[in-house]
């Protein structure tokens, strides 16, 4: 009788869930254990700053369904304390050791804490879990003081938009001069900044908080400009850090996330893969520099690819080369992006439109598209994403047939793994860009398929590079993911290849450094008009504020988040 294999998925979010689903779709019939630090099962995080906060959704509405029978063991409310790659075990509370044959690292990220912030004060919040979102909502219901959002990224802007429509006063404090400057470029950032200012959001940009003083009437913030704000609630949206503390001492490279090979295998490990916000890998579609991508849709796709790579083994696995996509909605404006706009050296306007609130901006490097950002133009962006996919598609080498043959077929993959047909060409005139090259080659360290820690132990455990039992990953599922990506867009209402319902997410951490001044291509439409100069931020009225927050009140909205775990339908055990 053969030894029953076990795959341990560390992380109770969307990346871990989709990894487990893909393992079952590809025929892995042995044991799957999902370990999550939160007491709740996987849920949809993007609505925390929107629908859940304003009362349009209950906590139970955020639960992520499983699209296949998982037959998995769930270890919720169980933080992982460490791991030993040589012994193939992870350490759990109480001295428990959980053995694995394959390990998936999908622990995501944690909110970044800033020095001096009184995190012990109940009026100071982060926005990463259901419990934190409900605590913020209850705080806003008890105060008439303004809400202060510390951070000028996507989460902060979405939260400010939601809070403004609830009827309260909102102030965004950020060190940058514009909102979303690192994610969408300076020109679009100016437009989005004016969008928030025009809708009544107070902006304290280019400033920092010098002193925090919690008082009975509110949290007092002294800004570098001399302005003093008394806030009824403060939300810290200053970015995130990878959740890798449990990996310290393991020997893995965890600087700014878990360093991975192009196939999602952790560097030098054939039995460990990583997926989601915690993984830092080289997307050969753009270049060989490892980056993390903190987009919701990327976590879904990377989780599925990590499952394919784990079953195939390092020798047969294919690189993960997606077209990153994200979207956000602020004050009624839909912001969508594709690729990595921060890599662009120049910009070009791709959508001739008479409407000032519609645009598609292309980010160009070396004569080819590397990123797109659209405002209120979902259909046009869908077409241009297909062009972006074509220009950046890398040339991948076919896997070794002998390596693929080592995988034992169990059952054919489900129809969810299939890739739809080709994308319709853009209906708009394409810019005069140089055709794409064959794509960069990965120039990282030489990877070996041998077990990194010597021969297999005497207890019969296979070597680290041995693929788990499954079925060969279809070529279409490996090489056609980019085409599927071009057909699938969150927020468009257009069905895509993935069963999940993607939604907005945080901006990628790789969007660092200023972008050059935007410019339109020669012969193109005129550049966008410059916004009006920023207005001075009004000082706080010393009189008690009279504005009242207004919330929707669905039944059971404020129930403890832990209660949603009781609403999960029981999964039947496999038989036979």
Image: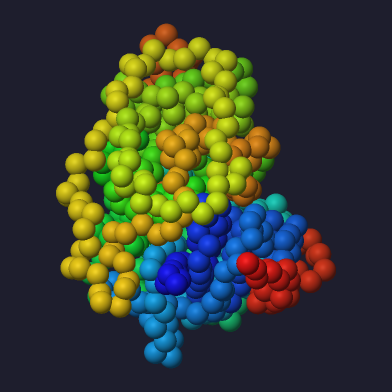
Residue at the bottom extreme of this rendering: 94
Residue drawn 61% across and 72% down? 40
Q: Is residue 223 visible to us here?
A: no
Q: Quadrant of the N terminus?
A: bottom left
Which of 344/455 is in front?
Answer: 455
> Can you give x and y, in whole percent of width and height, for residue 145 in the image?
64, 67
The vertical placement of 212 against 260, above or below, is: below
Which of 495/179 is in front?
Answer: 495
Residue drawn 65% across and 77% down? 562
**Res. 215 image quadrant:** bottom right
> Can you give x and y, in whole percent of width and height, for residue 535 in the image?
52, 43
Tell me which colouring the rendered structure shows: rainbow
Q: Is residue 260 left or right of residue 576?
A: left
Which of 242/484 is in front?
Answer: 484
The vertical placement of 33 against 48, above or below, is: below
Q: Is residue 51 left or right of residue 99?
A: right
Q: Quadrant of the C terminus?
A: bottom right
Residue drawn 47% across and 15% down? 430
């Amino acid at each position: 009788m053969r030894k029953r294999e076990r795959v341990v998925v560390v992380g109770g979010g969307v990346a871990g869930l989709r990894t487990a689903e893909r393992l079952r779709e590809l025929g892995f019939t042995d044991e799957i254990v999902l370990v999550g630090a939160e007491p709740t099962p996987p849920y949809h995080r993007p609505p925390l700053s929107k629908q859940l906060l304003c009362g349009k959704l209950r906590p139970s509405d955020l639960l992520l369904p499983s699209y296949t029978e998982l037959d998995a063991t769930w270890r919720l409310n169980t933080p992982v304390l460490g791991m030993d790659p040589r012994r193939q075990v992870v350490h759990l509370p109480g001295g428990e050791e959980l053995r694995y044959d394959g390990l998936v690292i999908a622990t995501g990220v944690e909110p970044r804490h800033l020095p001096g912030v009184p995190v012990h004060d109940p009026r100071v919040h982060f926005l990463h879990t259901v419990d934190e979102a409900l605590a913020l909502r209850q705080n806003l219901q008890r105060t008439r003081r303004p809400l202060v959002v510390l951070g000028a990224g996507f989460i902060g802007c979405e939260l400010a938009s939601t809070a403004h429509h609830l009827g309260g006063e909102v102030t965004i404090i950020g060190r940058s001069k514009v909102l979303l400057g690192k994610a969408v470029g300076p020109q679009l950032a100016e437009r989005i900044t004016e969008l928030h200012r025009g809708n009544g959001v107070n902006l304290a940009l280019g400033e920092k908080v010098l002193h925090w003083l919690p008082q009975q009437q509110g949290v007092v913030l002294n800004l570098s400009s001399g302005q003093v704000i008394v806030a009824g609630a403060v939300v810290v949206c200053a970015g995130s850090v990878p959740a890798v503390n449990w990996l310290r001492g393991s020997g893995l490279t965890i600087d700014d996330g878990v360093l991975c090979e192009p196939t999602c295998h952790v560097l030098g490990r054939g039995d460990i893969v990583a997926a989601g916000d915690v993984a830092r890998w080289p997307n050969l579609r753009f270049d060989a520099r490892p980056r993390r991508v903190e987009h919701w849709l990327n976590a879904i796709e990377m989780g599925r690819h990590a499952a394919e790579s784990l079953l195939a083994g390092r020798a047969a696995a294919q690189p993960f080369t997606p077209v990153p996509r994200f979207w956000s909605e602020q004050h009624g404006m839909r912001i969508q992006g594709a690729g990595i706009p921060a890599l662009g050296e120049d910009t070009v306007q791709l959508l001739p439109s008479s409407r000032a609130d519609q645009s598609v901006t292309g980010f160009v490097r070396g004569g080819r598209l590397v990123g797109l950002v659209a405002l209120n133009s979902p259909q046009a962006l869908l077409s241009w994403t297909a062009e972006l996919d074509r220009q950046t598609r890398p040339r991948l080498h076919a896997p070794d047939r002998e390596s693929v043959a080592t995988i034992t077929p169990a059952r054919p993959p489900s129809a969810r793994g299939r890739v739809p047909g080709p994308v319709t060409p853009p209906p708009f005139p394409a810019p005069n860009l140089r055709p794409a090259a064959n794509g960069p080659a990965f120039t990282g360290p030489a990877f070996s398929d041998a077990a990194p820690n010597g021969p297999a132990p005497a207890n019969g455990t296979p070597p680290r590079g041995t693929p788990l039992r499954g079925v060969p990953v279809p070529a279409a599922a490996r090489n056609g993911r980019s085409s599927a990506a071009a057909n699938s867009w969150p927020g468009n209402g257009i069905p895509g290849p993935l069963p999940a319902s993607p939604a907005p997410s945080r901006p990628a951490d790789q969007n660092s450094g200023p972008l050059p001044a935007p410019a339109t291509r020669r012969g193109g439409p005129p550049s966008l008009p410059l916004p009006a100069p920023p207005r001075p931020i009004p000082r706080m009225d010393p009189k008690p504020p009279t504005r009242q927050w207004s919330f929707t009140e669905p039944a059971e909205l404020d129930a403890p988040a832990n209660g949603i775990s009781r609403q999960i339908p029981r999964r039947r055990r496999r038989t036979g």
